Amino acid sequence: MAQRRLTASGEALPLARPFRISRGVKTAADVVTVSISEGGVTGRGEGVPYPRYGESVGSALAQIAEVEAAIESGAGREELLDAMPAGAARNALDCALWDLGLRLAGRTVESVAGLGRADRIVTAMTVGLDQPERMAEAAGLLANAPLLKVKVDANDPGAQLRAVRRAAPQPKMIVDPNESWTMAEVEGLQDLLAELRVDLLEQPLAAGQDEGLRGYRSQIAIAADESLHTADDLAALPDGYTVGNIKLDKTGGLTGALQLAAALEARGIGLMIGCMISSSLSIVPAMALAPRCRFVDLDGPLWLSNDRDGGVTGENGYIYPARPGFWGG
């Protein structure tokens, strides 16, 4: 095997507009980018360190530095599963190794992993948290999209959701409180969620404080996000969750995402593929799983002022594949 060379760096990618959720506001996507070169070929990967999980660009770069020598000596994706914890750093490395391996083999990710490919994919378009009238304005601009994802908190979510539904009566809807509700709010808002034709409630309770969902039968499907990182989390996951949100930054890459998808399917739990605010370099690996998923939420690059050249494009709630050769063979 030719000698490998690994480089890693942090970047702040400005957003076109602020992104608000119950935990705060983002104006830039802080990402870590990895390149691994071998024999004149380079594979790339990106991870998004998430402060909610105790991550930062600095900590991710430090984790990557710890395994740099092993990667340059030939360590592969399977070795990473034991050498590093799941998270953004491992995601960047794992996806770079996928890209490198596919390029060296002259193959595509779909052919190797048995995944499908779609000419376009419906993605949730996010309505950020704001005053109800501003959320209505944002939703009105997306009224023709197939699927909305609405960020809410515990400060009168009913008003927030009614405003969005009035402005956008047709799209399917995901509601995401980002861990900000209590079990009383989950129960008390059931009839309203049904009335507003909400299709999915995503992680309403804080991770580690969601035992109220054990044995609970909701009128609306409930997805685990922060409570579900890897396949190892499934044993303790309350059965009130009927959908699992797979994010490569939680699973530590596409390798872990495929493991989690298989484990969810084996338990009869529906699949969702999600993302952080990121560039297309994060999204294209995740898109490989989209055809298997009931819900797709991959609009991260559409929030950026400028995405990476050749990345995905989006229009009216659909995303279209990146230019050939962008990532994955």
Image (tube, helix red, strand yellow):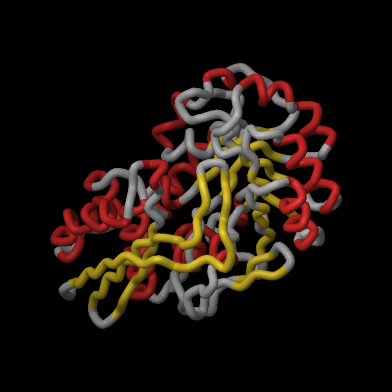
Question: Residue 191 is drawn in which quadrant?
Answer: top right
The residue under the point 56% across, 29% down is: 205
The residue under the point 38% across, 41% down is: 53
Q: Quadrant of the N terminus?
A: bottom left
- Residue 45's spot in the image, x, y percent? 37, 65
Give the tally of numbered discs: 0
Q: Quadrant of the C terminus?
A: bottom left
Name the residue nearer the viewer: 78 or 154: 154
Question: Residue 13 is drawn in which quadrant?
Answer: bottom left
The residue under the point 55% across, 31% down is: 267
Name the residue nearer the viewer: 206 or 152: 152
Residue 294 in sight in this render:
no
- Residue 48's spot in the image, x, y percent? 40, 56
Name the residue nearer the viewer: 185 or 2: 185
Residue 162 located left or right of residue 244:
right
- Residue 230's spot in the image, x, y percent? 42, 39
Is 201 above or below relative to 165?
Answer: above
Residue 220 in sight in this render:
yes
Q: Residue furthest bottom?
A: 40
Question: Residue 202 is drawn in which quadrant?
Answer: top right
The residue under the point 70% across, 21% down is: 187
Residue 187 located left or right of residue 34:
right
Is 218 above or below relative to 65?
Answer: above
Is 328 above or below relative to 204?
Answer: below
- Residue 70's spot in the image, x, y percent? 16, 58
